[in-house]
Amino acid sequence: MGFGERARRVRDGRLAYGRRVAALCSCVSLYHPIGHRATLSFLAELAGPYQRHERALLRALEELEASRAVWRAEAAAYTSERVKQKRLGRRVPAPGDPPPRGRMGGHWYAAAPDVSRRAAVHALKLWERDLPPGFANDEVRSVVRCCIAGGGRLGEEHSDTVSRLRTQAESEDVRWAMMLIRPGGN
């Protein structure tokens, strides 16, 4: 069953409410731009307590569908551009080219950049809260805290640090946190 069918179940008022909430969670299992748990939590921040209120459930689904639509459009544009480049003989993206945004992860896709920034900060707060003591080094924790304190904006002076940490991070969880951070506040 695909995303569209699961979304239809969320909207289906004939189903028991718990099944509709489960259908939303199932949608998130297919599209979770900032991680499964963080995406569900951020939807609750955007839409309200969807586990208990009908309007909040439908708003959460709308927010998720809107983000997914932006992601799909960006992925299609990237694919189209890569096809053109390959036809011109450029088989590998140039070092300065944007990364393939069609791959999900580390970014809430939205028409408004402030929503993407809020989502990143939300996910970073969850990450930091659940981080076991001594799991990440002080430099990683410091960069994450600076990003959270800056409301998702991290100064350009941290760009090199974030780039370096992305490539040499000791675990997938630390690399994930670095993917959420956008130097310059983008």
Image (spheres, helix red, strand yellow):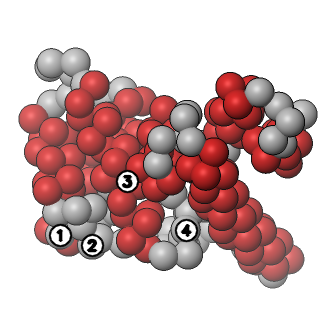
Q: CA distance from mark 1 to mark 3?
A: 15 Å
Q: Tell us which disc is closer to us: 4 or 2.
A: 4
- Residue in front for this viewpoint, 152 or 18: 18
Residue type, numbered disc 3: Ala
Q: CA distance from mark 4 to mark 2?
A: 18 Å
Real-space Cα distance between discs 2 and 1?
5 Å
Q: Quadrant of residue 171?
A: top left
User: 65 above or below 3?
Assistant: below
Disc 4 packing (10 Å; few <14; some 14–19; many ≥20): some
> Around disc 1, counting alpha carbons within 10 Å, would you say few (fewer than 14), some (14 to 19), or many (20 or more)?
some
Question: Whole-Å distance between the Cαs marked 4 and 1?
Answer: 22 Å
Q: Earlier in the sequence, mark 1 or mark 3?
A: 3
Please name the residue shown 68% across and 38% down the image.
Answer: 24
The residue beneath circle 1 is 155
Residue indicated by mark 2: 184
Amino acid type, residue under disc 2 in the picture: Gly
Residue occupying image coordinates x 21% and y 56%: 147
In the picture, the quarter occupied by the C terminus is: bottom left
Q: Position of residue 172 (x, y in %)?
A: 42, 30
Checking the image for residue 110, the label placed there is 4
Residue type at mark 4? Ala
At label 1, the amino acid type is Gly
Task: Provide the secondary structure element on which disc 2 rests.
Answer: loop
Question: Where 103 falls versus 26 (above or below)?
Answer: below
Q: Horizontal and vertical percent for residue 78?
A: 70, 70
116 lies left or right of 78: left
Frontmost of labels 4 and 1 is 4
Q: Is residue 150 visible?
A: yes
